[in-house]
């Protein structure tokens, strides 16, 4: 569920990006902005690595990708695939593909460059993964996301979500998530963000403090890197990732 909810942050303010290109990554805070009508946007976490010393657990993943298509009128549809995941814990080593997640995003404000933006994101996760990388049953939920320009260079982005996590045999529990991020453009190509994010499942709260950098390589291509620090026992002590996003 945490991976599902993670899906992504518009780290660079719109003023520093090519027109209509608002990447949804990196970071855990959702972007409220949908992909422009008739355009494809691909966002890939090329590689990630996480370590939790308390449980002696190491996890890694590669090429988790979100495919987004703009339907117009503030709507976009999304498919998230996670082809490779690996976990090493207690001397065991397991790998496999993760679940498929389908999402629908609606932007209600912010497409025309308003100072305030707002959107809703609904999702369904299908238990198509392998080994321990799959949900027990179909899961789903909804997130609200918003943003606000804070002067010439800073931008605030927030998100809050609720979902249903399956535990097998038709049993579900409620998952809550929320976060806030402050991003700043350093110039027309490079920016950074600071973020606090938390999710709660089955009474355990995983909270992290995150930071990252973004670089606009060309008008419709962004490169990024981020690092997350665990603030509670339920979160990994450290997680790092690199990624890429492009509007076609």
Image (tube, grey):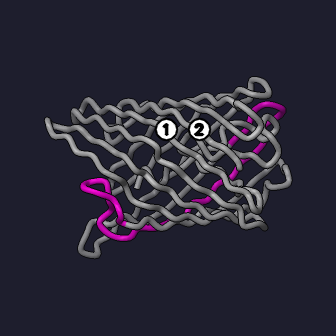
Residue 42 lies left or right of residue 87; in this view the side is right
Give residue 55's position: percent from left, percent from top: 22, 36
Q: Could you tell me which residue is drawn at 59 percent across and 32 percent down?
A: 224
Q: Is residue 7 above or below residue 73?
A: above
Neighbours of disc 1 within 10 Å: few (<14), some (14-19), many (20+):
some
Q: Quadrant of the N terminus?
A: bottom left
Location of mark 1 (residue): 46
Q: Could you tell me which residue is drawn at 68 percent across and 55 percent down?
A: 40
Residue 155 picture quarter: top right
User: Depth check: 6 or 194 in front?
Assistant: 6
Q: First in sequence: mark 2 or mark 1?
A: 1
Q: Is residue 68 above or below residue 57?
A: below
Q: Was residue 177 drawn as part of the magenta stretch in this picture? A: no
Which stretch is magenta?
Answer: 127-156
Residue 140 lies left or right of residue 233; in this view the side is right
Count how many numbered circles sit on residues in the image.
2
User: Are dots 2 and 1 in contact, CB under 8 Å?
Assistant: yes
**In the structure shown, which secondary structural element does the residue marked by tag 2 occupy?**
strand
Q: Could you tell me which residue is drawn at 71 percent across and 26 percent down?
A: 190
Residue 38 lies left or right of residue 64; in this view the side is right
Residue with the most extreme bottom position: 170
Location of mark 2 (residue): 244
Give residue 47's position: percent from left, percent from top: 45, 36
User: Depth check: 30 or 22 in front?
Assistant: 22
Q: Could you tell me which residue is drawn at 50 percent across and 56 percent down?
A: 80
Neighbours of disc 2 within 10 Å: few (<14), some (14-19), many (20+):
many
Give residue 100's position: percent from left, percent from top: 44, 61
Residue with the most extreme top position: 186
**In the structure shown, which secondary structural element does the residue marked by tag 1 occupy?**
strand
Q: Was residue 153 drawn as part of the magenta stretch in this picture? A: yes
């Amino acid at each position: 569920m945490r991976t599902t909810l993670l899906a992504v942050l518009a780290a660079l303010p719109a003023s520093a990006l090519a027109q209509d290109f608002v990447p949804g990554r990196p970071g855990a805070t959702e972007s409220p902005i949908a992909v422009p009508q008739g355009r494809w946007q691909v966002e890939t976490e090329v590689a990630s690595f996480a370590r939790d010393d308390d449980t002696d657990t190491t996890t890694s993943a590669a090429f988790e990708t979100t495919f987004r298509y703009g339907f117009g009128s503030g709507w976009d549809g999304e498919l998230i695939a996670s082809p490779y995941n690996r976990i090493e814990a207690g001397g065991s080593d397991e790998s496999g593909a993760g679940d498929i997640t389908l999402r629908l995003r609606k932007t209600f404000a912010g497409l025309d460059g308003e100072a305030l933006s707002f959107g809703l994101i609904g999702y369904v996760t299908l238990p198509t993964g392998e080994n321990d990388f799959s949900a027990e049953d179909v899961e789903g939920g909804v997130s609200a996301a918003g943003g606000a320009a804070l002067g010439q260079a800073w931008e605030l982005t927030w998100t809050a979500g609720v979902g249903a996590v399956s535990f097998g045999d038709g049993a579900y529990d409620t998952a809550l998530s929320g976060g806030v991020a402050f991003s700043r453009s350093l110039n027309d190509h490079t920016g950074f963000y600071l973020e606090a994010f938390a999710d709660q499942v089955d009474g355990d709260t995983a909270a992290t403090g995150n930071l990252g950098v973004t670089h606009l390589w060309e008008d419709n291509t962004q490169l990024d890197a981020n690092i997350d620090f665990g603030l509670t026992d339920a979160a990994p002590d450290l997680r790092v990732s690199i990624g890429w996003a492009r509007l076609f």
